[in-house]
Amino acid sequence: MKEYITIHNIGPLKKIDRLEIAPFTVLIGESAIGKSTLMKVLILMRYLYKRANIRSFLRHSEITKSPFRIRFESLVKATNLVSMFKDDSYIRYEVTTDSGNVYTIEHGKTIRKIELPEINKEDLSFWKESFVSENRNVIPAWTANALTNKNASLGFYFHETMNDFAQAVREDKQYDLSYLGLKLTVKHPKGRPAKLMVSPSDDAYTPIELTEASSGIQTSTPLSVIVQHFAKDYSFKNAFRRSVLDYLYDNELLTKFSPVIELADLPKYVHIHLEEPELSLFPDAQCRLIDDLVKNASIATSNDRHMSIIMATHSPYILNYLNVLLHQHAEGRAHVDADDMAVYRIFEGTAQSLMGVDEKGKAIVDTYDLTEMMSVIYHEFNELSK
């Protein structure tokens, strides 16, 4: 499957044409340049395509009445994107399936109504979208005070992140935080919020509560936990029941339901959208975290699902580490094939690919964009030292 996104005149994004979204996609650029905007538009269109799949699945299964009414303006409002749209804003989202069929969803001033494509039987799939917000550092304290936060709001994307994290820690469990040499233990005392304890992988010292851990641990733990949950434990069966079977039951349509394909046979996709994975982490830990994310995407493949990751970053360390991911092949190390990686610099409303080849014809990421500043600093220091 291949995905492409076209975005014209939405927020700071002026003209991005048929940008390919690879299974591992990285966006770099200055602050407020449009990286998060691109991800938010992408997840919106992916959400619509997910609905198209469910609606098509029902129609192929003899259910002609759809549970989904598409009101694009309501979705834009719910996701706090209204101020980004202008009179000449335009979006085109395109999916090319493995069978070669192409499905598109468009929005623009001259398009009166969003039309969801009818997905052929052989192209049906089931999707899950997750957005990991940059303000995830609030999650440890929010979880510890869950009983008093019921009516509080920190915005749509924070609560999407919080809901995914809450689902991941709903049961007693242990999560690997090996990029920091740690582990997270989840316990549920009766009648109290979940207790989240961080301890070294070798149990060398006494566990501490996540709320008392360093800022890097508090910020990166929700990200890591969410990715591990969707790679290993997320139940597509339960999600299918909530999306489809509950609707059929509530509308007395179960007797008419003749599934064209069993859920177990549907290709399953998890799309993770990450804002600034590097937040509050030492450079070495940033690289080890990226390693872990890629490894979990591989684990997902062995667990009946495909996981793709798109992230927005400012980190020169992550950008440079992408070349390690491309070329390392040692057992136990993370690796990304060149065909599965895309790296874009978002600049002046456009997107520029940083993927290229070296003198030997091997794939490489052009890291000059985020390493130039180091040379400037070094030159300035040398001038001052004269």
Image (spheres, grey):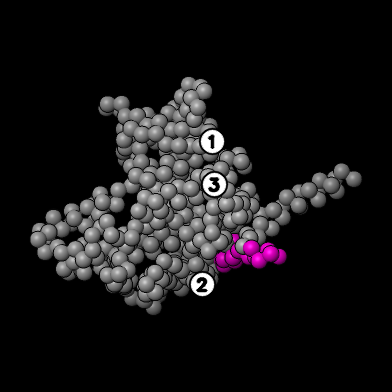
What's the mark number on residue 331?
Answer: 3
Question: Residue 78 at what x, y percent from top left?
Answer: 35, 56
Q: Residues within 10 Å of mark 3 (few under 14, many from 20)?
A: few
Residue kind at label 2, given as amino acid type:
Asp
Query: Percent from the top left, x then y, of residue 159?
Result: 37, 46
Q: Residue at x 46, y 42 (%)?
A: 224
Question: Which label is found at residue 241?
Answer: none
In the image, which is nearer the foreground, mark 3 or mark 1? Answer: 3
Of residue 256 and residue 334, the one placed in the foreground of this image is 334
Which residue lies at the image location 33% right of the left edge and 76% below the top edge? 112
Q: Is residue 62 above or below residue 208?
A: below
Label 3 element class: loop
Whether residue 385 appears in magenta in the rendering, the answer is: no
The residue at which mark 2 appears reads as: 17
Quadrant hosting residue 359: bottom right
- In the figure, is residue 118 to the left or right of 316? left
